[in-house]
Image: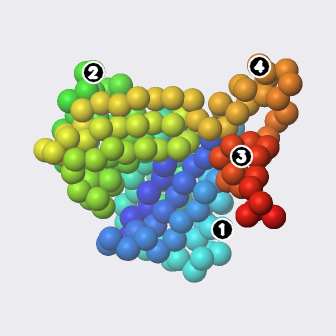
Amino acid sequence: MLLVIDIGNTNTSLGVFDGDSLVAHWRLTTERARTVDEWGVLARNLFALTGVDFKSIDAIAIASVVPPLNFTLKRMAESYFQLTPLFIDHTVDTGLKILYEPPADVGADRIVDAVAAIHKYGRPCIVVDFGTATTFDAINSKGEYVGGVITPGITISADALFERAAKLPRVEIKRPQNVIGGWHSAEDD
């Protein structure tokens, strides 16, 4: 089975695949100070909680946008799984041709998002990822990554609005009852 780890700035997602089937997945806070052993204990506990055999993992792939954690996760994989993980970047043959220049500037998260979108939805496509940043990536009809845009994420934007607009209160990010704030129709009663 394959253990995949997506290390984002805010969250780290882990998943276990048996072939094309996702058999378990978890989301953790990305904690840069977490040690090799803490990662190992967390992984073993998560596996135990879901009944996935820890020893059944025969490959690990990591997509990381937090370089300070790469060494820690590499050591965790070696120590706790006895495996050398594959770190995804522009040099790995994922089947995705990157037309953006320089290709090294395309993050691992955006590469795996594009590959997954092509696999699931086909091409051409636009890939949108709502994380710490919101990213929009364009895949052409040949399945090539042509580029994209990075914008502040929803939480970052809401925090900035609260900090910079004196009369606006901090609000919870949730689906509103109405698109127009403060208004409701008689039908809403």
Q: Please state which amino acid type lies under the numbered disc 4.
A: Arg
Residue 96 in the image, given as x and y percentages of width and height: 22, 44
**Against 89, is 2 above or below?**
below
Q: Please state which amino acid type lies under the numbered disc 1.
A: Asn
In space, the residues marked 2 and 4 are separated at their CA atoms by: 35 Å
Give the residue furthest to the left. Answer: 142
Residue ID at (65%, 30%): 157
Q: Please state which amino acid type lies under the numbered disc 2.
A: Pro
Residue 123 in the image, given as x and y percentages of width and height: 21, 51
Instruction: Verify CB contact (< 8 Å) between mark 1 and mark 4.
Output: no
Q: Is residue 64 visible?
A: yes
Residue ID at (43%, 48%): 62
Q: Write down the residue under mark 1.
A: 45
Callout 2 crowding tier (Cα within 10 Å): few <14, some 14–19, many ≥20: few
Q: Write down the residue under mark 3.
A: 173
Residue ID at (13%, 44%): 142
Q: Earlier in the sequence, mark 1 or mark 2?
A: 1
Q: Write down the residue under mark 2.
A: 102
Residue 156 in the image, given as x and y percentages of width and height: 66, 32
